[in-house]
Amino acid sequence: MPLFDNNPTSSRKPTNKTQRLASSVRQPDTAQTHRGVLVIVALLFGCLTACSDTSVTPDLMVETREGPVLGKAEDGVKHWLGLPFAAPPVGELRFKAPQPTKRWSELLETTEHRSACVQKSGFLNPSDETYMGSEDCLYLNVYAKESMPAGTQQPVMVWIHGGGNTIGSAETYNPSHLVRDQNVVVVTTQYRLSTLGWFRHPALRTTDTSAIDHSGNFGTLDTVAALEWVRDNIEGFGGDPDNVTIFGESAGGHNVAALMASPPAQGLFHRAIIQSGIMSVGDLKDAESPYGEDRYARSISSFELVNELLILNGSAGDRIEAATLQRSLSSADIKALLLDAEPTRLLDAEANARPIGAGMTRAFPDGAVIHSEGILGALRDPTWKHVPVMIGTNRDENKLFNMRNEEFVRWGEPSALLSFLPNMPKAITKPDEYEALNRFGSSLWKLRAGDDIARLMAERGDVDLYLYRFDWGHFDKVGDVDLADLLGAAHAVELMFLFPAALENFIVKWALSSEALADAKSLSATMRDYWASFALSGAPSATNTSAPNWPAFTQSQPVSIHLDGAIGNGVTAHTGALTLNDVLGELASDDAITADARCRIFTRATFGDGNRLPEARGKAFYDRYCAEFDRDAFISEELAKLAGERDEVASSAEANEA
């Protein structure tokens, strides 16, 4: 098992469902969720939609290239929901690029959301059922202002949802405030998830498939197909097909970056916004090779997944037996096994096949769908066409994940006032270490997903580039715990500001003072102005508020905007960008934690795919600060905890299935 990353450009962040060791840097929706946190956070961030009276009128009919559709009007915004942009990827189409949808002649009513893509229930989609969704899920939604003058063409913003590329849906996000207040047309789209979205196996590479099919990047290709639909149809909804901005958060941010590195996507969008995304890609070799004895790999292996399928269907008793059997099967047999399996069985096999160290599900650098040198390679490529980019992270990214770790936060029975919760946070038991762990992990995230990327792109000199950090975290108390300390400006908090229907939810109002709520709404308006003006012109400005000018990030002037409310530091410009020396130096000089805690924090935050430092830097830190720290023993202890959690999750899934 490698201790550090020999590739200094790697920025992968582990999001293993069972990998608490790397919890300080993983994406929110691939971690095993503590039930109490799930309820609190889902109520805070999952309530991004709003319900109200609706009406359906004939003037909401639009003729698309596929056929006529009829939407509905709601609160000054026109909605067309569940628009098919590709054929259902089922049967022989399961592991292929999306195909055109069938045309229709009769009026199609598009007033209800369609099913999410098949996924395990979890962080953003709490449910008593183990699975939800359908393979028939390639649908998008269009939102436009109701009072828009005839013939108007407004900027188009295409939202790609997050969820670790394993969960999530377009339905979660209601962009009505953006549409109504900032005069943009917004599209929210879905794409295949998990193994159904990103999967490579030699048995699928047959004579009747193309290089694009061979890529394994089916989820990426779904977003390309959605953009092609926008190009062909959005003018009928009042949008400008020549002014399209893609934006997304977390895994959605990664998918935006992947589209920036995708040959088929070139020319389909004109600006990009990456919120808390990652720039690393999947590993082509690990995606198809058997695991070694240490079971360490950067991507889930399709070979190992097929092994788990053979075990699950009773054809083999264990991994060794399954591997022997798989090697004896023909490509046709393996392909049939993969196409005939129930989608939920594929997800079970994927969970069982997850290696130590694997990060978030990511696009593969196959050369056909994604640049052969990956996202970073595309950014460095002087021949590659680039668009204006806005990129940033949140100040306390990692608190969303570490608040679930009972080593730092004690959970217990809810108070009578909060009896609707299964449990609630009672105390931060190691406040200094908790704060240091989050600060170090969040700074690494900012470095790899923001500042390093900004520097890399600024070197080209031909990119309009804007860098931000989101700092608002002025929450109230939950019982005896201050949410500002527990959660703060955590991963995904900024979504409430871009989709502020969430700020009207009763649980959010309960978690905010009246002053903080008013402050949040004010910052929401400023941020939506910045985002929409960037979509309009490629340069963010807040023309409707008193917020400051947002300077571009350049080599000579590395400037970023920090987004906070008036009860905090406000919206301010800052010169300078983080370096690895800055991040390591801050941890090394933190006198509030013990030497042992410093080494635990460093190990947690740099173990796993994409978080290992360049070998010389990692070793130098250990030699100087952790010479007496038994790293191997610590890792073994953590992995033992993870194994126990994995067994607990598997038992729970079996019980639910029974």
Image (tube, rainbow, N blue to C red):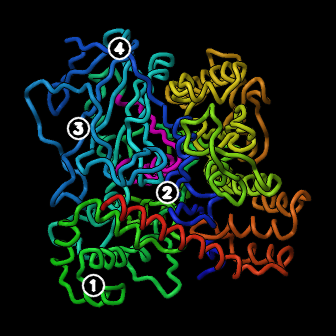
Residue density around tag 2, few if under 14, some if 14–19, many if 20 or more, within 10 Å: many
Q: On residue 84, which mark appears?
A: 3
Disc 4: which residue: 53
Disc 1 residue type (three-letter) = Ala
Say whether marks 1 and 4 touch (CB < 8 Å): no
Residue 203: % across, % down: 23, 76
The type of residue carrying mark 4 is: Asp
SS assignment at label 1? loop
Circle 3 packing at 10 Å, graded few (<14), some (14-19), many (20+), is many
User: Which residue shows up at 14% across the image and 29% down it?
Assistant: 67
Closest to the observer, 28 or 223: 28
Q: Position of residue 549 (x, y in %)?
A: 70, 25
Q: Which mark is residue 30?
A: 2
Q: Is residue 374 visible?
A: yes
Picture quadrant of residue 415: top right
Residue 255 on the magenta segment? yes
| Front disc: 3 or 4 | 4
Mark toward the start of the polypeptide (3 vs 1): 3
Q: CA distance from mark 3 to mark 1?
A: 40 Å
- Residue pointed to by mark 1: 316
Q: Residues within 10 Å of mark 1 (few under 14, many from 20)?
A: some
Residue at figure coordinates x 23%, y 38% from the top left: 84
